[in-house]
Amino acid sequence: MKKRGRGVGVMWYPTHPVGSNPSSAFAKINSDGSMVVMAGAKDVGQGSTTVLAQVAAACLGVPLDWVSMVTGDTGLTPYDGGSTGSRVTYIASRAVELAVAQAKKPLLLVASEHLGVPVEDLESGDGRIWVRSDPSRSIGIPAVAAECYSKKATVPVGAASYAAPGLTPPDPETGQGRSYPSYIYATHMAEVEVDTETGEVEVLRFVAAHDSGTIINPLLAKGQIRGGVSMGIGMALTEQILFQEGRPLNPNFMDYVIPTAMDVPDIEVILCDTPDPTSAFGVKAVGEASVVPTAPAIINAIYDAVGVRIYDLPATPEKILHALKTALASSEQQAASGK
Amino acid sequence: MIDPAIADHEYAGQPRRNEDTKGPDGPAFVSSFLRGDSLAGLQEKTQGIIGRSVPRHDAYQAVAGALQYTEDLRFPGMLHCRILRARYPHALILRVDTSRALDVPGVAAVITSRDVPHNRLGPMQQQHVLADERVRYLGDPVAAVAAETPETALEAAHLIEVEYRELPAVFDPEEALKPGAPILHGASNLFQRQNVRHGNVEKGFVESDLIVEESFRTPFLEHAAIEPQVALALPSGDGVIVYSPSSKPFSIQREVARALAIRQNRVRVIGTASGGGFGGKNEPILEPTLAILALKTGRPVRGLFTREEEFVASTVRHPFIMNYRSGVSRSGRILARHIRLIADTGAYPAMDSKTGGKTALVKGAMMAAGPYRIDNVLVEAIAVYTNQPVASNMRGPGVPQVCFACESHTETIARRLGMDSLEFRLLNAYQEGDVTPFGDTLFSVGLKQTMRQAAAAFGWAKEAGR
């Protein structure tokens, strides 16, 4: 018989790994107002290079295609702690923001002279700098950039390093300290179908709602979350390295089963932005947390479907059948002793 | 040779309490864009650049097959590296003889620990580039070959003669803690401890109407990136260039420079397109060996793990053994939670520099009690050495493990109380201003929002209480 069940799992996760962990960036604005940003942060497929370009473009106030990125090259870019601990958007965005702000200063000075208002009264966007109180009075960023190079003989460059401030490692005995700057939260919900004759589980439906602060790029955030949920489905149902005397028995993708598109349902992702006041634009983090509550949501859904709890992952068909058999035996025993 | 301590600045990151690094907490620190802005205002102000779904910068290249991965790189005269690994999970190395391997036509170099200028890696300096005296798991590298083809390199690696004295091994963390167990490092297999203490759990249990205790386990997991470990090193001027998809190019630079005993300016690590990392490409598993071979042969050398090697010799996720005991009031408030965690860290400490190899233990312990207001919490977590693969960072180190246990346990409690799963969680969930068991005051807490929005989208209430 096939039985359906629903389960929930919630989680919290730090926006940053333990310990001080800086990012840094260089920014240089060309004489036509375009910009090259050199950031140490390495894109590992999550799309951080695109996100940092968006941050840089927003900070300078130019269209996205005026920004080019050089990343993750120790010969060209300044240091970065790495694409680990879900930290890149949270930390490196700030480094980029600060570097661009520095490079932008000479442009603002030139614009201030032309528009006759102090730098503080200027705003920028879409390739222009304008007077906040009167947006009709404006000047193009290419023009002020060109003037920096020519009349001012100043190259607009910026360099910045940023680390989350005030972090201290946890006391090993009590955990007290300030280990993490802030946190993200998520709720996953799964609907599964369990075949009580074979023990097989199919994930039918999945909803993942994440508070990851301001989202710079929803497409990439959702992509990461769907990837994480897929990984979590593997953790819940199929993945484990089996060892005999230290030797892996299943060191291949035939016997170590990761989910394929056939095993992953449509995943509905909801982004509940709760901006973080400690970061550039209020960003938090996305990467790792997306895998965190998936397995318990599925395991709880299995319980809801067939009334057995799996205490050791993964919930293989063998374990589910065994648990069903044990549950049946004990209920029969109870019924018998009840007589 | 450079004193390794010189290259050590980053490891100073058992970060000290330093007033200089303490930033302003007040409004000056708030992003200028965020001050008083709604999210909609923010988007308007940035012409929609923030919050816009732009495809990844290399997406079109990737789907068109035009993106160059490390495996696609070719250099004239490029050699291929294969690594000989330990024959036993725990043994002393008595003798290594590479002469037969060197005789194989097409072999350019064979290296052992004797060829490594500084043969220690990572913050704890406990891992080696190539094993010298002892191997502690089957993935331990013993020697490396550079040859014209990968096949020749493999053939030669099989001809390296290693004489071992086998030692007793231990494969289970609980066994590893028993008296008389084979010891991997130092005086005990207990690698690290991380506790969290908040309130008084015993008092909390006394006040509880219901106490629930359960135990959970998770297994070793592989990152299973489609692209295995791969890197390429080529001699350049008075140093070396390393192409690597690593998630931490600067850490690779530091480790390669230190292994070669040269300054970091002579090592350039160029980050290449990543075929998947998930934490599995954080550590200098391959790059120092390739750099040494490149300098020895004067030729580019590429290394590429087989899928089997990926399981044997790359890092894995820590298995956790977890015991949860919780006390709750009849009304559904969690009053006390006592958690014991045992993490199997494998044969060596992870090479994450910031915590001296205990990131998974720390994060697991800190997040273990879940996102719930609980006045009395005790977490006792340890990481233990075994003769298993090295456990290190994998997407959320330590946290998917404890979340599985915590949320399964939370569900059991809700059912025992006869409460709806979501209602029970909402009752206890963190909100703005709550203080964590380790003393953090929380802000920007969107937890309940995620629960309510997920429930609405899922239709949770429709059939609740079935």
Image (tube, coloured by chain):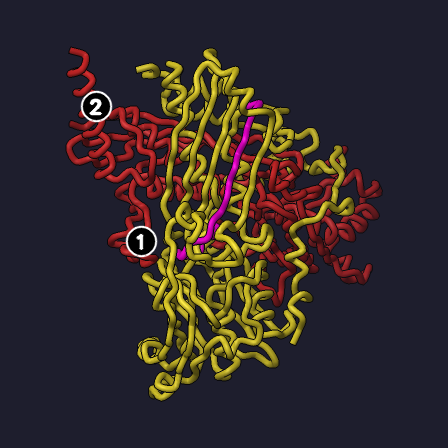
Chain colours: A red, B yellow
- At a point 48% along the width and 14% down the height, the residue shown is B329
Numbered label attached to residue A309: none
> Would you say A26 lies left or right of B212 here?
right
Say which chain tag 2 marks: A
Q: Position of residue B462 (x, y in %)?
A: 34, 16
Residue placed most toward the observer, B245 or B324 = B324
**Location of residue B202 with respect to B9 vertically, above or below:** above
User: Label 1 to label 2, Cα distance in Å?
Assistant: 32 Å
Residue placed most toward the observer, A50 or A275 = A275
**Location of residue B325 with respect to A294 vertically, above or below:** above
**Location of residue A179 with respect to A73 vertically, above or below:** above
Query: SS of the residue at dot 2?
Result: helix
Q: Position of residue A28 (x, y in %)?
A: 69, 58
Residue B170: say if magenta: no
Could you tell me the amino acid type at mark 1? Phe
Range drawn in magenta: B373-393
- At a point 15% along the width and 27% down the height, the residue shown is A1
Tell me if I can see residue A127 in this picture.
Answer: no
> Would you say A167 lies left or right of B275 here?
right
Say which chain tag 1 marks: A
Q: Which of pointers 1 and 2 indicates the residue nearer the eye?
A: 2
- Are the residues under badges 1 and 2 in a single subunit? yes
Looking at the rendering, in which quadrant would you find the C terminus of chain B? Answer: top left
For mark 1, what is the residue? Answer: A243
Query: SS of the residue at dot 1?
Result: strand
For mark 2, what is the residue? Answer: A330
> Would you say A89 lies left or right of A242 here?
right
Could you tell me the amino acid type at mark 2? Ser
